[in-house]
Image (cartoon, grey):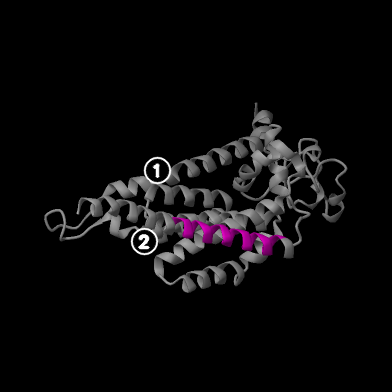
């Protein structure tokens, strides 16, 4: 009997280890297949690597854009401002397309998209500079989404066929394939936002963890600000954690603040970072007006 009991933990641990190895192997395979299809069928480059450009300008101390730190500068959908209004830098040939253009030596150029994806590529830009392939990074994030979708699908079906089918439908039956393979400025933001949103769903559905779900939603928000609207989904999905039912706590309805505070704690740093960036940009844009007033 003692010998049998001694073998039970080992048998269970081997079973769990084998299960985890199987899941890990499937996740690696899904990443590899998705990456291969996205990359080798896709264009493998983009003329709009503007998050890489923005990262390079940030590294050199600029939230605005300078041509010397930017690749394919003229393909940018530019926001141009000098503290007084819309402007053109002197000699800008695009001014010919506007009636009565206003030129300003203080005119600065900004990217109109959120800065979250630019922060993601900063480590790569530190190593490779503007030669970092933004499309490659986009495809990697797209491929990393596949294992997360699979793990979420496993929460709803125990059949491997169903799990793989749902993953394939998401990765190859939606616009995500084309978007991730494109890698251009808007598409890269969409791809990274989708990755973090699915990561948030994983921490809400597969392994409920309010702080991590909040953090992933915050990261998605920095990539695509409109994704903050999905916050209502997480409020609903976490109802079993934060809502006290009459059968608990002496038969009274109530709210458990710990899951709510955990979710808010994960989300708050990203909202704060976005607020700081908006404040800095506002100060930069209004700086010339304040100097003139003084």
| Label disc, if present, on residue 265 of the rendered structure | 1
Q: How far apart in space, not on screen, are marks 2 and 1 (Cα)?
A: 17 Å
Q: Residue 188 appears at what percent x and percent y?
A: 65, 55
Q: Please tell me whether residue 121 belongs to the stretch shown in magenta.
A: no
Q: Residue at x 48, y 69 (%)?
A: 163
Q: Residue at x 49, y 44 (%)?
A: 271
In the shown orientation, is residue 265 left or right of residue 60? left
The quarter of the image holding the C terminus is top right
Residue stretch rendered in magenta on the structure: 20-39
- Quadrant in the picture for residue 69: top right
Q: Residue 265 appears at what percent x and percent y?
A: 39, 43
The quarter of the image holding the N terminus is bottom left
Residue 82 shows in this picture: no
How many residues crowd mark 2 within 10 Å: few (<14), some (14–19), many (20+)?
some
**What residue does disc 2 label?**
237
Q: Secondary structure at mark 2?
A: helix
- Quadrant in the picture for residue 247: bottom left
- Return the residue nearer the eye: 144 or 236: 144
Q: Residue 123 appears at what percent x and percent y?
A: 65, 39
The overriding secondary structure of the stretch rendered in magenta is helix
In the shown orientation, is residue 101 left or right of residue 294? right
């Amino acid at each position: 009997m003692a010998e049998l009991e001694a073998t039970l933990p080992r048998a269970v641990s081997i079973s769990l280890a084998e299960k985890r190895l199987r899941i890990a192997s499937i996740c690696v395979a899904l990443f590899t297949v998705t990456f291969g299809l996205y990359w080798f069928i896709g264009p493998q480059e983009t003329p709009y690597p503007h998050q890489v450009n923005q990262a390079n300008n940030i590294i050199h101390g600029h939230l605005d854009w300078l041509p010397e730190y930017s690749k394919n500068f003229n393909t940018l959908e530019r926001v141009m401002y000098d503290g007084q209004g819309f402007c053109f830098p002197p000699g800008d040939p695009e001014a010919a397309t506007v009636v009565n253009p206003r030129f300003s030596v203080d005119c600065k150029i900004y990217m109109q998209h959120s800065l979250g994806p630019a922060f993601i590529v900063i480590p790569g830009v530190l190593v490779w500079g503007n030669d970092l392939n933004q499309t490659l990074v986009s495809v990697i994030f797209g491929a990393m989404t596949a294992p997360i979708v699979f793990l979420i699908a496993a929460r709803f079906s125990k059949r491997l066929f169903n799990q793989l089918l749902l993953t394939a439908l998401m990765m190859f039956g939606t616009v995500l394939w084309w978007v991730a393979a494109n890698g251009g400025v808007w598409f890269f933001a969409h791809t990274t936002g989708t990755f973090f949103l699915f990561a948030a769903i994983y921490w809400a559905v597969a392994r409920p963890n309010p702080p991590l779900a909040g953090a992933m939603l915050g990261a998605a928000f920095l990539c695509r600000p409109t994704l903050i609207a999905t916050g209502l989904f997480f409020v609903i999905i976490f109802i079993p954690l934060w809502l006290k039912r009459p059968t608990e706590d002496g038969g009274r309805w109530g709210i458990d603040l710990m899951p709510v505070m955990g979710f808010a704690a994960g989300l708050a740093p990203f909202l704060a970072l976005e607020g700081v960036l908006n404040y800095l940009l506002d100060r930069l844009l209004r700086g010339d007006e304040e100097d003139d007033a003084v």
